Image (spheres, rainbow, N blue to C red):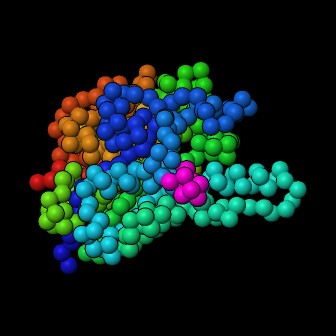
Amino acid sequence: MELKRVVVTGLGALTPIGNTKDEYWDALIKGKSGAAPITYFDTEKFKTKFACELKNFVATDFIDRKEARKMDRFTQYAMVASDEAIADANLDLDAINKLRVGVIRGAGIGGLETFQNEVLNFAEGDGTPRFNPFFIPKMIADIAPGNISIKNGFMGPNYTTVSACASSANAMIDALNYIRLGQCDVIVTGGSEAAVTIAGMGGFNAMHALSTRNESPKQPQDLLMPPGDGFVLGEGAGAIILEEYEHAKARGAKIYAEVVGGGMSSDAYHMTAPHPDGIGVIAVMRNCLENAGLKPEDVDHINTHGTSTPLGDVAELKAISEVFGSHAKNININSTKSMTGHLLGAAGAIESIASILAMEHGIVPPTINHTTFDDSIDPSLNLTLNTPQKREIKVAMSNTFGFGGHNACVLFKKLD
């Protein structure tokens, strides 16, 4: 069976550094940090007092007030980003076959704020279970694609992938395969997350996962090398329209890039720590290259998982050196998390968007806030430190890894 070609025809982004894909891209190139003191709740007793929240976002500017009240923030974010991507793709909803349009999105946690608030309200009451009737529909991780399909009438595959921080990359790989196999013409994919909450911050602090550099929230991380003291939590959503190539060409769609491969692996090692030798990361990048039919020397740019954890960053960079050998020094490597923070289940989506736009514009966004270099890292690697770098990008790779040892990798190629 001959596999169909799959292309990207629409993008939507709602991030801590920009509320549209164009704002997001502009901020990436300028090296803008989204980190700031938390405004959603009182952080006086919290170890970490800053995060990468959305700025100047009001859900009811985009969603009817009554409908917005039925949605957790992670679903609101998904709706707004998906609307932008659908509009960007110039999809004629009256002309396409909606039975062949799916929605497959990722979320690592889902409606955490809804769960938190309902439980707190019960605990503070008299023991009578007065729960909101929308409690469960707002909380469940699969509700975001459900709402997107309901709004637009999309009747193809509809579900959420949950693999911690690899969730939206896994969603993209599933979407890629449905279209490759001829089962769909179009899929709205990506991911969203809204974990900047009392429970989210408290939980990640308890496991010592978050940066505690409260004195300098705009410069909290040394990404891609120690002594990173933990990640900065972010929130938002990314949406990507994947489309069968001939379907896109027939309707005259703008094509950003071709999705040529996806790889997955497991560390099979520890609940939260990566394998110190990067075995799973090596495997996932090789799997992705094989799936795409590409060689290591074909890759020009890698947007790393790079979260600013000492174990994770070193393991990933060592894995890149292992997989790409002498070619590794020719690759522009970066971590856009240095600007957006870590969007958990939405990370793979917004970082793939960054890679696609880097390919389109011929500019690699920087890894900001770099101050130190670890001796165990190959000094010849180009980590795109502090300033953007111009270059032609024909092939870009995006890596995302999640607690539980989940690894996902996606390859994008400039259309021939």
Q: Residue farthest to the left?
A: 416
Residue 390 falls inside the magenta stretch: no
Which residue is more in the foreground, 361 or 299?
A: 361
- Quadrant where the C terminus lies? bottom left
The answer to which image quadrant residue 178 occupies is bottom left
- The residue shown at (31%, 32%) is 26
- Please identify the quarter of the rendering in which residue 388 is found: top left
What residue is rendered at 20% in x and 42% in y? Answer: 360
| Residue sitting at the far bottom | 1
Q: In the image, residue 183 lies at what x, y percent?
A: 29, 76
Question: Considering the image in quadrants, where does the N terminus appear?
Answer: bottom left
Identify the magenta region: 64-74
> Which residue of the protein is positioned furthest toward the right in this rendering?
126
Q: Residue at x 54, y 28 (%)?
A: 36
Q: Is residue 164 visible?
A: no
Q: Residue 241: x and y, percent?
A: 31, 58
Q: Nearer the viewer, residue 193 or 371?
A: 193
The image position of residue 375, as x and y in percent, is 42, 28
* Vertical placement of residue 354 versus 407, above or below: above
User: In the image shown, does 401 or 120 lie closer to the viewer?
Assistant: 120
| Residue drawn at (67%, 55%) of the image | 115
